[in-house]
Amino acid sequence: MGLIFTHIRRFFTILRSEVIVLPGRLALVLFVIALLALPLFTQDLYFLRIVILTSIFAIFAGSWDLLSGFTGQMNFGHALFFGVAAYVTALLNIHLHFPPYLSIPLGAVGAVLAGLVVGIPCLRLKGSYLALTTLAFPIILTGIVFAIPGVTGGELGLSGLSRLSSSRLMDYYITAVCMLGLGLVMWLITDSKTGIILHAIREDEVAARAAGINTTRYKLLAFCMSGFFAGIAGGLYAHFMRLAGPSTLEVGLSFQVIIWSVFGGMVSIYGPMAGVFILNPLMEGLRVILGKYPALPEMRMLLFAALVLLTLRFMPEGFIPWVLDRLETECPRCKIRNVFFRHRCRICDAAMS
Amino acid sequence: MNTRRFIVCLAAGFLLFAGLCPSAWAADSIKIGILGPMSFTQGEGHWNGATMAAEEINAAGGVKVGDKMMQIELVKVDTNEFLSIPDATNAVEMAISRNKVDFLVGGFRTEAVMVMQDIAMDAKKIFIGCGAATVEICTRVTENYDRYKYWFRLTPINAGYLGKVDFTLLGTVGAIMKKTLGLETLKVAVVAEKAAWAEGIVAAAEKTLPEKMGMEIVGIWRPSPVAKDCSAELAAIQRAGAHIVFTTFSSSVGLTFAKQMGELKIPAAAVGINVEAQKSGFWEATNGAGDYVLTINTYAPVKITESTLPFYTKYQERFKEAPNYTAGTYDALQILKAAVEEAGTLDSDALVPFLEKTDLVGTAGREVFDAAHDITWGPGYVTGLGTQWQEGKIQCVWPYNWEGITYEGTVPYKLAPWVVEAWKKKD
């Protein structure tokens, strides 16, 4: 009993001293609570659908950041992982009747293999050459999809997958928990020793190699890990939509994930994920609002483009880091972050100015 | 209780009742969700056709549901399906769960329609498809009737039937060329845009033309759907001595190809599918070089039925363009009206048997659904049309004495003068 009490007290101490004191962390906690508690207030099917798709795309955006943000391996064809996993998941579910809890992880393993296929030839490439090469892979796979319609369903895709779960509410919790859990895992990876090495490769690959790091192995690892997380997103998508079609490999999806990540703020995992949670519902809101005026639906993409351009112009690090920089300041002495209105550091008591 | 207080209480009670019972007020109208990519010409067709039908039905008093007359209220559902499948699913979900539509009509891109179909079937909403031609969408009805029985396809005729019309048009033009020019064996150039949907037609052409139609294939060309220059293909076709170019185009390459073919006066007749040539602006877009191009179509200024010409003329006057096949939403609303009036209810399960018995003379022909809830094609039903550009006007040239059918206003097919000149000289 005493042990439990100690843990509870410790939890509240951490909450008071490490979470509530920083707006970013507080916002994250409130977001998690709101996400998990949302169905208590509404179980509107449309609303839940929006959040489910947003959660799936948030995993996808986080996985892109892991590869391109942290490791610097600029991937312009990230839809490849998403699409491969969607197709593998669909094939396993339709032909071998694997339930979603098996077909989705195995689909992600398919995406890992795709990561290896892409990663190996791309290891020697850098910058724009790497970006353009990765862009080609989903296009090649789209060609293969159309070439073997007997297996892939061609233009129609593979439909008739079993449902993710028995109800929309359950779908919601599965995707939300997966998003939160995988987001945490990705963040822990970037915060681990491996994450530091990936970061080092991004900053200076030659220096990392000179330090004795097998950069080839780590770059391949990044491709595979990113492929796995994107694959989970692709598998969830296929089961939720009950379809794996050529649209999962579209160039537009590859660019969409870059836009979400750049908007939210790269090299943070939570930035791209937050970017999806802002932009995806916003675009849907614009669709609904502008749809009421006959001449305005075309303005949606224009507004979207303008928003992204303005973000890039005035918030080059992304929206979330920009907001955090205004809400939190770093202590000049101990580098600990403090809420912006504090005059003295909460840890070392140094003057914040 | 004084009078003032009584009025206030009455007003408050009325407002409370109105607030608690929104469905009681909404029940005076039948809500129909019109699904389509509204920023594109296909979606505009969906909306325009449905708008015309709804206005006409409402002006005539509405739809009789049991003893009650109800007005039609259209809900514009922009699916954005060309660009985003999730957008399409969100839009349909919103139409069903938020806008509380009673029926769904429209859809275009097959991949999106299949997902939207699933959402509609989950909600047991009648969904009349007016855009996707793929056979498999209706196959679902026969494979799993209980789930997919709420789906019906009205327009276009399915891809299999489109192929039949396609080859019938080719055979018709071939016969005319043989007769007019005295040609013995016809040489055909197969030109299809490099897209998945065209693969089946190319494969069928490779087999059918030499084996069943006695035609020689001089080559197969597959330009990009968005090619801006087809002069190389056209030069090769001319060198190959083709009499007919069998086209399969749904994208902008159809415009480029037709324009350059006319400008270069390639001595061959263009026959087949060219979606660009179905549009009113085709003549201006090709600077008149698109003359003599023949394409499959759904609507033309001919009397397919009594309602075709009034619909065509009114549509063209109002929207300044000819209706494309997605404007078949006009007939979809008429079909729904007939079924609802007969069934006397809006309940989907009760309506399905009445929709299955549909036998309506619509704007595109006699509309009857088959066992797969697909529109029946053939003589006496919906046939589709072959339209040719003749001196700046879109003219119906097929069916022309086909299975005893010639629609009033149909004109004979015309060969381009340079085609006649080229091949008559050689004789």
Image (tube, rainbow, N blue to C red):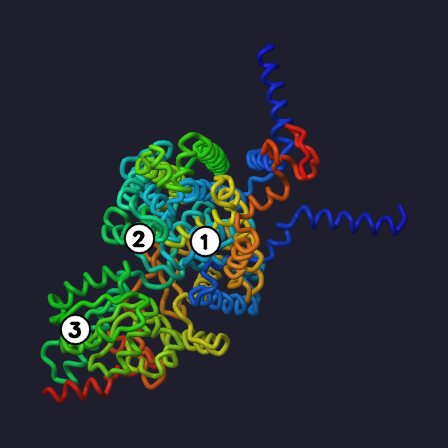
Q: Secondary structure at mark 3?
A: strand
Q: Is residue A324 left or right of residue A97?
A: right
Q: Is residue B325 left or right of residue B318?
A: left
Which residue has dot 1 on it?
B88
Q: Is residue B171 left or right of residue B355?
A: left
Instruction: Please name which of the two marks, 1 or 2, marks the residue nearer to the observer.
Output: 2
Please state the horizontal and vertical placement of residue B350, each as a whole percent of the image.
Answer: 46, 50
Q: Are marks 3 and 1 on the same chain?
A: yes
Residue A92 shows in this picture: yes
Residue A18 vs B128, above or below: the answer is: above
Instruction: Please name which of the two marks, 3 or 2, marks the residue nearer to the observer.
Output: 2
Quarter of the figure with the C terminus of chain A: top right
Q: Secondary structure at mark 2?
A: helix
Residue B81 vs B362, above or below: the answer is: above
Whole-Å distance between the Cαs marked 3 and 1? 40 Å
Q: Residue at x 19, y 61 (%)?
A: B203
Which residue has dot 3 on it?
B188
* Callout 3–callout 1 Cβ contact below 8 Å: no
Specify the amino acid type for callout 1: Ala
Whole-Å distance between the Cαs marked 1 and 2? 27 Å
Which residue has dot 2 on it?
A136
Please state the horizontal and vertical placement of residue A333, each as a whole percent of the image.
Answer: 61, 33
Residue B141 shows in this picture: no
